[in-house]
């Protein structure tokens, strides 16, 4: 699961604009990421893990569903 998560992060980072931040957080109780673009657009990615394997990946970018999140807080560098 760790290798797949790292691969996913690396793949996602390639398509992100400069200034994008990522934070590791629990997302709906699952390990995941909060991604914030320089313009403030948020996206979450959550990983459902069973028996040390990622079984499902959930991604949400609907602003109405993410308005409770803070755009920038303890960012992880994307480069």
Image (spheres, rainbow, N blue to C red):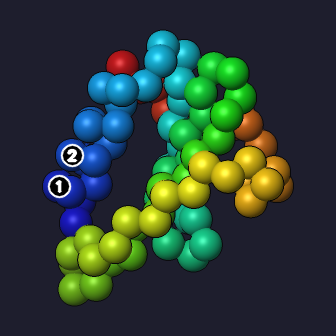
Which quadrant would residue 72 be assigned to in this image? top right
Please name which of the two marks, 1 or 2, marks the residue nearer to the observer: 2
Q: Residue 34: image x %, image y %? A: 57, 47
Give the Cα separation between the discs numbered 1 and 2: 6 Å
Name the residue: 61% across, 34% down. 36
Q: Nearer the viewer, residue 77 or 65?
A: 65
Which quadrant would residue 25 be assigned to in this image? bottom right
Q: Give the numbered dot on residue 7.
A: 2
Q: Nearer the viewer, residue 42 or 3?
A: 42
Residue located farthest toward the left when viewing the structure as drawn: 3
Q: Nearer the viewer, residue 26 or 60?
A: 60
Q: Residue 19: image x %, image y %? A: 54, 16
- Disc 2, SS: helix
29 relative to 31 in the view: left or right: right
Name the residue: 28% across, 47% down. 8
Name the residue: 59% across, 27% down. 37
20 relative to 52 in the view: left or right: right
Name the residue: 67% across, 52% down. 62
- Disc 1, SS: helix
Instruction: Locate the N terminus and report the quarter of the image it occupies.
Output: bottom left
Q: Can residue 25 be seen in the rendering of this structure?
A: no
Which residue bears the numbered disc 1? 3
Q: Can residue 12 be seen in the rendering of this structure?
A: yes
Instruction: Locate the C terminus and report the quarter of the image it occupies.
Output: top left
Q: Residue 61: image x %, image y %? A: 61, 49
Position of 39 relative to 54 (above/below): above
Do tag 1 and tag 2 residues touch (Cβ < 8 Å)? yes
């Amino acid at each position: 699961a760790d290798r797949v998560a790292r691969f996913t992060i690396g793949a996602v980072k390639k398509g992100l604009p400069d200034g994008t931040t990522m934070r590791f957080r629990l997302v709906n109780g699952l390990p995941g990421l909060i991604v914030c673009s320089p313009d403030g657009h948020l996206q979450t990615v959550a990983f459902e893990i069973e028996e040390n394997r990622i079984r499902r990946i959930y991604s949400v970018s609907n602003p109405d569903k993410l308005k409770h999140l803070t755009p920038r807080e303890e960012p992880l560098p994307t480069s």
